[in-house]
C-alpha cells in the first residue's frame, strides 16, 4: 500500500501518528470549535477566553484531560472572577496590575489549583486588560465554561490514541534509523 501513495503523503500520514502532531491538531480543533460555540452563546464580539480555556483543557491523553481539566478550569474561573472585582473597583493601572497578580497568586493557593496557580494570575491579567466594565466580565466566565466543556467533550468524543506501540515495531523502527 505504501508503494501506491506518493512519498510526501505517506510521510504526512506517518507523522500524523506522532503525539506532537496529533496533539497540535486536537488542540487547534477544540479551540476553534469552542470559539464558534462561544460566538453563538456570548454577547462578546471576540470571545477568546473560550478557545484559550479549550487549549488549556485538551491534553495528550483522556486521563490527563480528566485529572487536570478541573484544576485548570478552576484556575481560569478564579482569575476571571478576580478580574471582575478589580475591573469594577479600579480598572487597569500599574499598581492594580501588581495587586491583581499578588491577589491571584495568593487566591490560587487557596482554591487548590495545584501547579496551575500562575494560570489564575494570567487569566486575571488577560481579562482585566480587555474588560473595562464588570458586567462584560461575566461573559468571560461563560466563555471559560464553554471552552472547558468543549475541551472535555472533545477528548471524550475523540479519544486520544494510545501512544504505546508494540515493542517489536519500536525495535524495527530503531534498527531502520
Image: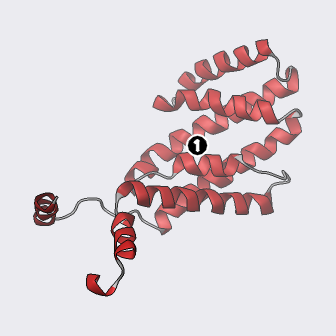
Q: Based on the displayed image, in which of its 4 quarters is residue 105 positioned? A: top right
Q: Quadrant of the N terminus?
A: bottom left
Task: Pick whichever, 90 or 8, lies toward us.
Answer: 8
Give the side of residue 151 with respect to residue 33, left or right.
left
Residue furthest to the top? 95
Give the side of residue 86 with respect to residue 21, left or right.
right
Q: Is residue 111 visible?
A: no
Q: Is residue 88 above or below residue 56?
A: above
Give the side of residue 47 with respect to residue 12, left or right.
right
**Image spot of residue 122 (x, y percent):** 63, 30
Q: Residue at x 64, y 60 (%)?
A: 32
Q: Residue at x 52, y 39 (%)?
A: 71
Task: Pick whichever, 85 or 10, lies toward us.
Answer: 10
Task: Pick whichever, 128 or 138, lies toward us.
Answer: 128
**Image spot of residue 33 (x, y percent):** 64, 63
Question: Badge 1, how many Cα within 10 Å: few under 14, some, many 20+?
Answer: many
Give the mark count. Answer: 1
Q: Residue at x 80, y 27 (%)?
A: 85
Q: Secondary structure at mark 1?
A: helix
Q: Quadrant of the C terminus?
A: bottom left
**Image spot of residue 119 (x, y percent):** 58, 32
Q: Is residue 104 above or below residue 155?
A: above
Q: Based on the displayed image, in which of its 4 quarters is residue 91 positioned? A: top right
Q: Mark 1 — residue?
A: 73
**Image spot of residue 176 (x, y percent):** 14, 62
Task: Pick whichever, 114 or 15, lies toward us.
Answer: 15
Q: Residue at x 73, y 44 (%)?
A: 141
Give the side of residue 143 with respect to residue 54, left or right.
right
Q: Is residue 39 visible?
A: yes
Q: Based on the displayed image, in which of its 4 quarters is residue 173 positioned? A: bottom left
Amino acid at each position: 500500500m505504501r508503494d501506491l501513495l506518493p512519498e510526501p503523503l505517506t510521510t504526512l500520514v506517518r507523522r500524523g501518528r506522532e503525539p506532537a502532531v496529533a496533539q497540535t491538531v486536537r488542540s487547534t480543533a477544540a479551540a476553534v470549535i469552542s470559539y464558534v460555540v462561544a460566538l453563538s452563546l456570548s454577547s462578546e464580539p471576540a470571545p477568546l477566553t473560550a478557545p484559550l480555556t479549550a487549549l488549556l483543557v485538551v491534553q495528550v491523553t483522556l486521563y490527563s484531560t480528566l485529572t487536570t481539566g478541573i484544576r485548570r478550569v478552576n484556575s481560569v474561573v478564579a482569575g476571571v472572577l478576580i478580574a471582575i472585582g478589580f475591573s469594577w473597583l479600579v480598572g487597569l493601572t500599574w499598581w492594580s496590575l501588581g495587586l491583581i497578580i499578588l491577589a491571584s497568586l495568593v487566591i490560587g493557593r487557596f482554591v487548590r489549583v495545584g501547579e496551575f496557580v500562575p494560570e489564575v494570575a494570567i487569566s486575571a491579567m488577560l481579562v482585566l486588560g480587555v474588560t473595562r466594565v464588570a458586567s462584560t466580565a461575566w461573559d468571560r466566565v461563560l466563555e471559560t465554561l464553554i471552552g472547558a466543556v468543549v475541551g472535555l467533550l472533545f477528548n471524550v468524543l475523540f479519544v486520544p490514541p494510545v501512544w504505546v506501540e508494540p515493542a517489536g515495531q519500536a525495535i524495527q523502527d530503531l534498527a531502520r534509523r
